[in-house]
Amino acid sequence: RDLIEKIHALGVLLFIVGPQSVSYDALAAANRSTYEVVPDGGGLASVELGKVLNSIGRSVSASRASTGQRTARRALFGQDRWQESQLTGHSGA
């Protein structure tokens, strides 16, 4: 819910190309989002990437004229407090 609120606050255009997923379904509910489901077993070869890229291009062009300066809380998941050892999974040999 917090991530969708941030997407709305920033006016993000969200494009998802991936397998069917409950998480992607939830993100696709955000305003101005597009979700292209990749069929099981087909991989990206089964997706018309030209169609997806054209859709992204049209959406970005249309939104550039209507966007203003927006703000939202940064580091939504506390990334600003993560330490390098947490990112790498270990601290040594």
Image (spheres, grey):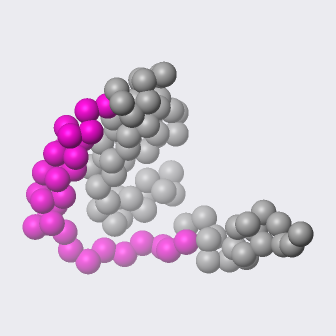
Tell me which corner region of the image, top left, top right, bottom left or bottom right, holds residue 81. Answer: bottom right
Residue nearest the observer in this picture, 52 or 28: 52
**Is 23 positioned to the left or the right of 11 in the image?**
right
Q: Is residue 17 visible?
A: yes
Q: Residue at x 35, y 64 (%)?
A: 9
- Please state the horizontal and vertical placement of residue 59, each as a whole percent of the image: 17, 52
Residue range (magenta): 47-75
Q: Residue at x 37, y 75 (%)?
A: 71
- Please state the horizontal and vertical placement of residue 40, each as a whole percent of the image: 47, 22
- Please state the horizontal and vertical placement of residue 22, each as a whole percent of the image: 52, 33
Residue farthest to the right?
Answer: 93
**Is 9 positioned to the left or the right of 88 in the image?**
left
**Is 83 positioned to the left or the right of 9 in the image?**
right
Q: In the displayed structure, would residue 53 be above or below residue 87? A: above
Number of disc labels: 0
Residue nearest the observer in this picture, 73 or 24: 24
Q: Quadrant of the C terminus?
A: bottom right
**Does residue 24 belong to the magenta stretch?**
no
Q: Residue at x 16, y 45 (%)?
A: 54
Q: Residue at x 42, y 72 (%)?
A: 72
Q: In the displayed structure, would residue 29 be above or below residue 56? A: above
Residue nearest the observer in this picture, 93 or 21: 93
Q: Is residue 31 visible?
A: no
**Does residue 62 belong to the magenta stretch?**
yes
Q: In the displayed structure, would residue 68 be above or below residue 59? A: below
